[in-house]
Amino acid sequence: MNNKIKSSIITISIILSLFGGFAGSAHAQTTTIPVPNASIYASLEGGYWPAYGGTNGQGVYNITGGYYDGRGYYLPTGNYTISASANGYVRTAIEKVNVKDGLETTNANILLPVSGAISGKITDAISGLPLQEVFVNAALNPLGKYGAFGTTDQNGNYMISTDLPTGTYNITVDNAVGYLSKTITGASITVGAMTSNVNIALSRSATITGTVKDAVSLAALEGIQVVAQTSGESDVTQDFTNSTGKYALNTDLKTGTYDIRVVSPEGYIEKNITGIAVTEGSQRTIDLLLDRSGIISGRITSATSGQPLDDASVWASSSSYNGIAYTNSTGYYRITDGLGTGSYRIVVWYQNSYIEATGVNVVQGAETPNVNLQIAITELPHGTITGRVTNSTGGPVYAQLQATGDSDYGTASTDANGNYALTVGTTGTYNVTVTSTGFADKNQTSLSVTLNQVTSNINFQLQLLPSGRISGTVQALAAPIPEFHNELIMLLVFASTTAAIVARKKNIKIQF
């Protein structure tokens, strides 16, 4: 046999052996194999993740929690759901894994099923050119707990090969800049197999572009949010103006009529232009001029003491406009957005008290100052328990406290220094309980509390609890479908073509 043909056949054999090796591992594997670099999440009953980690090269993991308090990570006592995920597999969980303080829960082993895979190409429907860096989503149909996504490469190709169990999927491309979203239904995926050539051609979106400027100075406004809405006020797409005031709404705008709205522009009045008709693939220019907001300012104080009130909310509303602000530590507020010319009602809320004023006149672009209001603060009599919560070294601990008496109770949390102030509404004897994640609970009984007095220096020193631990393995029955690089595919095509040409010239029959 000719040496060139031999060389080509050898090259093809090597490449095919690589493919065959992957395929063989997916179908002929009879024993479990470790899954390295799997992500592990431990979810405590209640739904949040207090622990996470990963497997080593042998598929082994060991996690000790996600609460960090300066000593390390802590895993509290409780029942957990342990979830594992890895590229090429379907994420899987085991439930009711019991953990106890200071003990290790072993053999929390997880077996991952091999994922199916889907691939294809995303192109422009008109030019046929590939679209790169476009997100493609695969969701089980009807929508269930599984779904995954991929991103197109520079040639418009995508491949999704994780979290795809056997089933029928919707394949969606959305939020592709300049294009309309599109979904293909009925894509059949099988574990351990590739569903290829699921190609999607995207139609071009309509485009609405323009410039946002100050209505008086005509200065370009940067960072202004502009949205396109349907008549039902559902946002379709949005953009923020750049340094020259330009915006572009060019994603998911189908042929139809839209409202163009400027959202909460700082120092200006919102603007809404209705009835903007567009056609897919076409462009319209809508320039926007924003009117400067009127301003209302003043101070909010206590009618009883005359002291300024911090963090009081001040709301201004007219028949067409409204705005809100909050007082600072000096009681000063300034409403600067969303106020057009008109007569306003001012409502001030502070704790459980409020006051209002009417007939406050505002002119857009001008300030109405000295709108000062006093609120009569009604403070109920109360007793107070104060102190500090620390750890064994004297450091502050973030903790929750509850005081329980015969006819009342109160709750509080410590600040950054471990200090707390706990108030109750009746004179009596109280029991105080302190809890903090990673520490043993502590309580103090028979504390005497009197209205309008402070029971001070009720301090607590908490003792650390030893962390629980969870360990186990993550394994699979087969290796996942590999994500082949384009270079490898091109090498196979080149080698196959070369061998075929040489064989044709030598009139030699070659079978692959």
Image: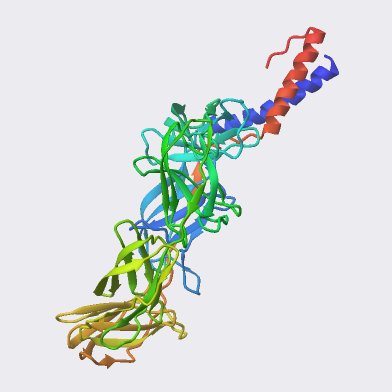
Q: How many marks?
A: 0
User: Going by the image, does 251 lie left or right of 411?
Assistant: right
Instruction: Residue 226: give x, y in percent of width and height.
Output: 48, 49
The front one of 241 and 380 is 241
Judging from the image, the colouring scheme is: rainbow
The front one of 289 and 347 is 289
Q: Residue at x 33, y 58 (%)?
A: 46
Quadrant position of residue 407: bottom left
Quadrant position of residue 437: bottom left
Instruction: Residue 4: give x, y in percent of width and height.
Output: 83, 19
Q: Is residue 495 above or below residue 364?
A: above
Instruction: Residue 241: give x, y in percent of width and height.
Output: 55, 51
Q: Residue at x 34, y 91 (%)?
A: 457
Instruction: Residue 204: give x, y in percent of width and height.
Output: 53, 31
The front one of 123 and 93 is 123
Please state, as top left, top right, bottom left or bottom right, where the C terminus lies in the image: top right
| Residue sitting at the far top | 507
| Residue sitting at the far right | 3
Q: Is residue 276 above or below residue 401?
A: above
Q: Is residue 120 above or below residue 302?
A: above
The front one of 268 and 37 is 268
Question: Can residue 149 be seen here?
Answer: yes
Q: Is residue 71 above or below residue 30?
A: below
User: Going by the image, does 432 lie left or right of 245?
Assistant: left
Question: Can residue 327 be seen here?
Answer: no
Q: Residue at x 37, y 63 (%)?
A: 323
User: Going by the image, does 501 lie left or right of 97?
Assistant: right
Please state, as top left, top right, bottom left or bottom right, where the N terminus lies in the image: top right
Quadrant position of residue 210: top right
